[in-house]
Amino acid sequence: QAQLVESGGGNVQAGGSLRLSCAASGRTFAMAWFRQVPGKARDFVAAITWNGGSTYYADSVKGRFTISRDNAKNTIYLQMNSLKLEDTAVYYCAAATRTFSESIYYSLTNSYSAWGQGTQVTVSS
């Protein structure tokens, strides 16, 4: 079971940028970022295949967020640009211990067996 540690959250003004990092210990395959606001379900943000060859994004972040990974460091990143007030949330890193046969699985919370502790991102006007 991979252990995941996120970093890089913080406060930023609307229109600004932040980069989140997630360092993993242990073997990982697909990895992803999800986010959650109080009282709501955890939502998919972005995912990346084990070799970085394919990436997937929620419609709400396409064109603004970029997910990437450095397997030499066993780390994934989420570059967030043009941040909006509605991007405010706790962001969670997730890792899967298998590959997925269909792209739909990348956006499902149940596809991932390891989760980080979360990092708060707050966007203000």
Image (cartoon, grey):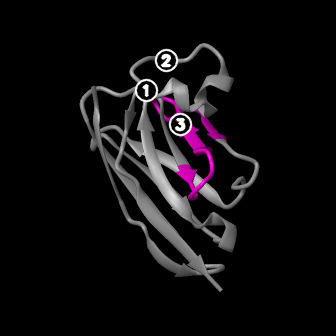
Q: Secondary structure at mark 3?
A: strand
Instruction: State which tag comes first along the sequence, 3 or 1.
Output: 3
Q: Secondary structure at mark 2?
A: loop
| Crowd rating for badge 1 (residues with CA inside 10 Å; few <14, some 14–19, many 20+) | many
Query: Percent from the top left, x then y, of residue 51?
Result: 45, 30
User: Tag 3: residue type?
Assistant: Ile
- Which residue in the structure is indicated by mark 2? 99
- Which residue in the structure is indicated by mark 1? 96
The N terminus appears in which quarter of the rendering? Answer: top left
User: Tag 2: residue type?
Assistant: Thr
* Residue 125 makes an appearance in the image: yes
Q: Residue furthest top?
A: 101
Query: Percent from the top left, x then y, of residue 12?
Result: 52, 80
Kindly report the distance in space between the C-alpha atoms of the residues bearing marks 1 and 2.
Answer: 7 Å
User: Tag 1: residue type?
Assistant: Ala
Q: Is residue 71 magenta?
A: no
Q: As rendered, which of 43 and 9 lies closer to the eye?
A: 43
The C terminus appears in which quarter of the rendering? Answer: bottom right
Q: Is residue 16 left or right of residue 115?
A: right
- Which residue in the structure is indicated by mark 3? 48
Kindly report the distance in space between the C-alpha atoms of the residues bearing marks 2 and 3.
Answer: 11 Å
Instruction: State which tag comes first along the sequence, 2 or 3.
Output: 3
Residue 3's image quarter?
top left
Relative to 101, residue 44 above or below: below
Q: Residue at x 36, y 45 (%)?
A: 116
Q: As rendered, which of 79 and 115 lies closer to the eye?
A: 115
Q: Are marks 1 and 2 in contact (CB under 8 Å)?
A: yes
Please provide the residue range marked out in magenta. 35-56
Kindly report the distance in space between the C-alpha atoms of the residues bearing marks 3 and 1.
Answer: 11 Å
Q: Residue furthest left?
A: 25
